[in-house]
Image (spheres, grey):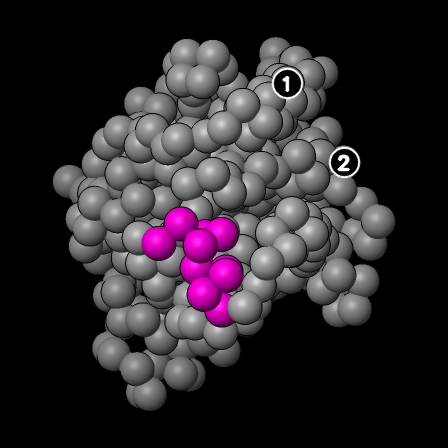
Amino acid sequence: MVNYNKVVMIGCGFVGSATVFSLMESGLFTEIAMIDADMAKAEGEAMDISHGIPFAKQMRVYAGSYEDVRDAGIVIITAGANQKPDETRLDLIHKNVGIFKTIIPEIASRDFQGILLVVANPVDILTNVAQKLSGLPENRVIGSGTVLDTARLKYRLSQHLGVNSSAIHAFIIGEHGDSEVVAWNCANVSGVPLNEFCELRGHFQHDKSTREIAQDVKNSAYDIIQRKHATYYGVAMAVRSICEVIVRNDKSILPVSTRMHGEYGIDDVVLSMPCVVGRDGIETKVPIHLNEEEIRALHSSAEILKEMMDSEPLE
């Protein structure tokens, strides 16, 4: 039986530990198990985070094992090699596919019936790997995708326009990485097309502004890594948001990593597209209106991911 009050975190590095801390604060779960190749690391992080429980809601946070996967509502995988300065997410593929070849069979052997949420990078490639190795229905194997990239875009647009980010409706799609695509064609602020709203706020150089904002968003992770060697707070909040949508069965629309089946002429590639997400995982993809340039860019992003996936055999 699936227990949606229980989540398992596999990987207790910066991202995994920051995510568990955020989940502890949220009060979303009553049980959080932490698994790491370094058992002492998992124990130490669980102990440290547990000391915050008196300031939150009652729950149990502990170092666990793969046996904890059996009844978990959500299993999150952040385990993997860290991204280094000047290293792209795709540079991580060989190392992290190897790690997934040890993790995913452990999950699959436990008759896991919940949602598998992949966060480790390159997330689109590893979501693809997790789907293939686990044998789980693909709607139940989700990548965090461009949820964080989209949040960065909304934050940057909110600064540019001087409005609350909750009023901004926009998506980044494709790869979570260098070939990501901003879907400017369907972006709006409370229903007002983005360019029209920009002019309401005194901004008229649309092409220049969108290029600069897209570049800033794409380089965000690199800029942070250059300064502090890792990113973890933003992605922790993104993962928390995805977990909330799943546990509460919100049916929210999130740009998560999902397998394409002919949409926009793309087939058998995992990349980020807006999807309705709930307790059963991905329910359906949401078609958004892209212009010809955006469709071409999405195809290019898909081709990059396909080539990288093809270069890393799973046998």
What's the residue at 45%, 65% (across, down)? Answer: 200
Would residue 263 be visible to someone looking at this image?
A: yes
Q: Earlier in the sequence, mark 2 or mark 1?
A: 2
What's the residue at 59%, 27% (across, down)? Answer: 293
Report whether 271 appears left or right of 89: left
Report whether 169 appears left or right of 293: left
Q: Is residue 180 above or below residue 68?
A: above
Dot 1 amino acid type: Glu
Q: Which picture quadrant has residue 256?
A: top left
Dot 2 amino acid type: Asp
Q: Is residue 197 above or below residue 130?
A: below
For the residue pair 298 and 293, the one nearer the viewer reads as: 293
Would residue 110 be visible to someone looking at this image?
A: no
What's the residue at 46%, 30% (across, down)? Answer: 290
State which quarter of the image contains the N terminus. Answer: top left
Magenta-span inclusion, residue 46: no
Report whether 119 appears left or right of 62: right
For the residue pair 311 and 63, the one nearer the viewer reads as: 311
Q: Is residue 18 above or below residue 136?
A: below
Q: Which picture quadrant has residue 209?
A: bottom right
Residue under label 2 = 91
- Give the main secondary structure of the magenta stretch: helix
What element does badge 1 sit on? helix
What element does badge 2 sit on? helix
For the residue pair 141 and 278, the one nearer the viewer reads as: 278
What distance separates the C-alpha of mark 2 from that of mark 1? 16 Å
Q: Is residue 268 above or below residue 5?
A: above
Question: Bounds of the magenta span?
Answer: 192-201
Q: How would you rate the neighbour count of disc 2 (Cα within 10 Å): few for under 14, some for 14-19, many for 20 or more? A: some
What's the residue at 58%, 37% (across, down)? Answer: 181
Residue under label 1 = 303
